[in-house]
Amino acid sequence: MGKASNQDDQDYKARSAALRLLARREHSRLELSLKLRQRKIESDIIERVLDDYEAEGWLSDERFADVYARQRIDLGYGPLRILAELQQRGVYTSPGCVRDMTDSDWTERAVLLREKRFGLGDISEDWDEKVRQGRFLARRGFASDQVESALERRL
């Protein structure tokens, strides 16, 4: 009898913890799995609970990716960084909001970010400043052609 009640207790613990975490914000399946493992819940129970929650529509990697990407875009991050961060969270598909943006859209975002952070002064003669701003935009996840276009923009 102890084994069955322990199994039920683990199942209840996994379901309630997962639901509490999902109530706060969207999670990817990998994130939720890792958080439940930290709570010392058995792997087979975690997989069963996550399968049930996906079937119910409470857990969705696609929805998580879309919400996450939109937040990161609003914070000034580029497509390379957003996709890399999603992969770290177990999502290997590109969300629609990232796919729908063109290269020129991303370049405009890089220009706006550069303007906000540094201004749009002429830096064509100041190599050190150009490198500094380019490095900043690259760290934010913009592609090299997007960075170059943003650095060429002037007031």
Image: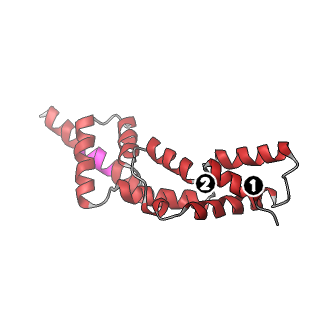
Calculate the distance from the C-alpha at mark 1 to the C-alpha at mark 2.
16 Å
**Which colour assignment does the render follow?**
secondary structure
* Location of residue 139 (image quadrant): top right
The residue shown at (53%, 63%) is 102
Q: Which residue lies furthest to the right in this view?
A: 125
Q: What residue type is labelled 2?
A: Tyr
Mark 1 / mark 2, whichever is N-terminal: 2
Q: Is residue 30 above or below residue 108?
A: above
Q: Where is residue 95 in the image (x, y as percent from the top left)?
A: 43, 58
* Location of residue 154 (image quadrant): bottom right
Q: What residue type is labelled 1?
A: Leu
Q: Is mark 2 on a helix, strand or loop?
A: loop
The residue shown at (31%, 59%) is 58
Residue carrying label 2: 77
Single out the mark in the foreground, 1 or 2: 1
- Give residue 151's mark: 1
**70 sits left or right of 7 in the view:** right
Q: Quadrant of the N terminus?
A: top left
Q: Where is residue 44 in the image (x, y as percent from the top left)?
A: 22, 37
The residue shown at (85%, 57%) is 122
**64 sits left or right of 128 in the view:** left
Q: Where is residue 18 in the image (x, y as percent from the top left)?
A: 34, 50
Q: Where is residue 133 in the image (x, y as percent from the top left)?
A: 76, 48
Write down the region rendered in magenta: 10-16
